[in-house]
Amino acid sequence: MDKLNEFKLGYKALIGAMIGAGCGLASISFYTHGVFVTAISQDTDWSRGQIQMGVSIMILMAIVTAPIVGSLVDRFGARIVALLSIPLYGLSMSSFALIGDDINHYYVVWTIMSIIAAGTLPVTWTRVVNQWFDNSRGIALGLTLAGTGIAATFGPTYVTSLIQDFGWKKAYLFLALTISFLSMPAVFFLFKEPVTRNTNCENNTVKKQLGVTFRNALQGHQFWFMGVALIFAAGGISGLITNSVPMLIDKGFTLSEAASYAGLIGVSVIVGRLVVGFLLDYFWAPMIAAIFLSSPLIAAIILVGNSDSNLIISLSMIIIGLAAGAELDLLAFLASRYFGLKEYGKLYGSLYVFFSIGAGLAPALFGRYFDINGDYDLLLYLIIIASIISGLLMLRLGPYPSSKNTEQNV
């Protein structure tokens, strides 16, 4: 009944958060970028490597912007931050339609967009969902971040049709308008922090605002274990996602065959978010984290081998997607359970830095290594090792802090 009541009270905020997350910077710009790369390279004299730097700028900029946004969310509220950032995201994305032949202008737009649209990062959406949901927090976070999986599934197809009809510059303009029209009303009308207080929910409201301070969290081992584990996990998963198609082509598959296999990743991201969210409400979160974040080692073993079995290759892509779907769910859930919500935004944003380092550096590292050596074998072996380390660090987090200990650290 407690879980059912949470959904009755918080379903509107949950829907708003899911739409916001699906239309956010880390979702739309990441999952549609691959489609734009080919079109831009054909229309300009820029190389694919140069164009790929755009998304690397976006991911790495989060090292700076995520902690700042987290602090703003804690201070002013997630709804205000989101309502300011959504139109700025659309405006900055529209600027791609105005750039000329100088690739530095392209990089400037990515940099500005990464700053002013940072309020659409997951820290904003998960903050409010954590406030509404406690007993069913895992599945609520899974549903929220499933919005990114929906974007990964349908975004590339939508952008492809826009590029074919209007060209890549106008495609950016129409994409900006689309995400603004979808997300702005949903966030304005649905995405609200809990304000109603009654006898039954007042205690829950008080409880949800308890937590350790940012300084106290830095003094404990859990914060650093989570952070290092995220670097290893995000690096391996990001490297596999961005290079899965080239790896399969190297195995002898055609481009269309490789792309069809890689398409399994997007669907698996949605499944991963929902499955992990459900499991988090019933099992110890570090155990779930260890299982999902270490699972890319199986995909790496498959890809480094000589198997060309449809079933085996499909399995490797599904595993990559499941792991990718688990990352941010786990980060939001673990941060809320081990540190509480007192300074959740600042703590989540700081942990997101570790995620950004791994996810941002891996694609460039994979590409550079391949340019020099002509294969990915050593990197796949390193993913196996990194996955094991990530899982072991999660298992070392220990039990959730008790309510008494949390109150003492407020």
Image (cartoon, grey):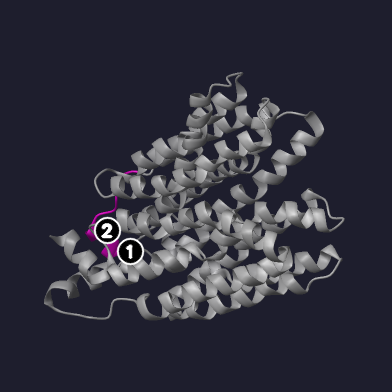
- Amino acid type of the residue that numbered disc 2 sits on in the rendered structure: Asn
The residue drawn where x is 17% and y is 65% is: 5
Left or right side of 119 for 93: right
* Residues at circles 2 and 1 in contact by the CB criterion of under 8 Å: yes
Q: Position of residue 301 (x, y in %)?
A: 55, 24
Magenta span includes 403: yes
Q: Position of residue 385 (x, y in %)?
A: 55, 30
The foreground one among 148 and 65 is 148
Q: Position of residue 331 (x, y in %)?
A: 43, 53
Q: Secondary structure at mark 1?
A: loop
**Quadrant into which the N terminus falls:** bottom left
The residue drawn where x is 48% and y is 62% is: 22
Identity of the residue furthest to the top in this view: 306
State whether residue 181 is above or below residue 298.
Answer: below
Residue 6: quadrant of the picture: bottom left
Say which residue label 2 marks: 405
State whether residue 327 is above or below residue 389.
Answer: below
The residue drawn where x is 67% and y is 36% is: 255
Say which residue label 1 marks: 409
The foreground one among 372 and 407 is 372
State whether residue 206 is above or below residue 282.
Answer: below
- Bounds of the magenta segment: 398-408
- Amino acid type of the residue that numbered disc 1 sits on in the rendered structure: Asn
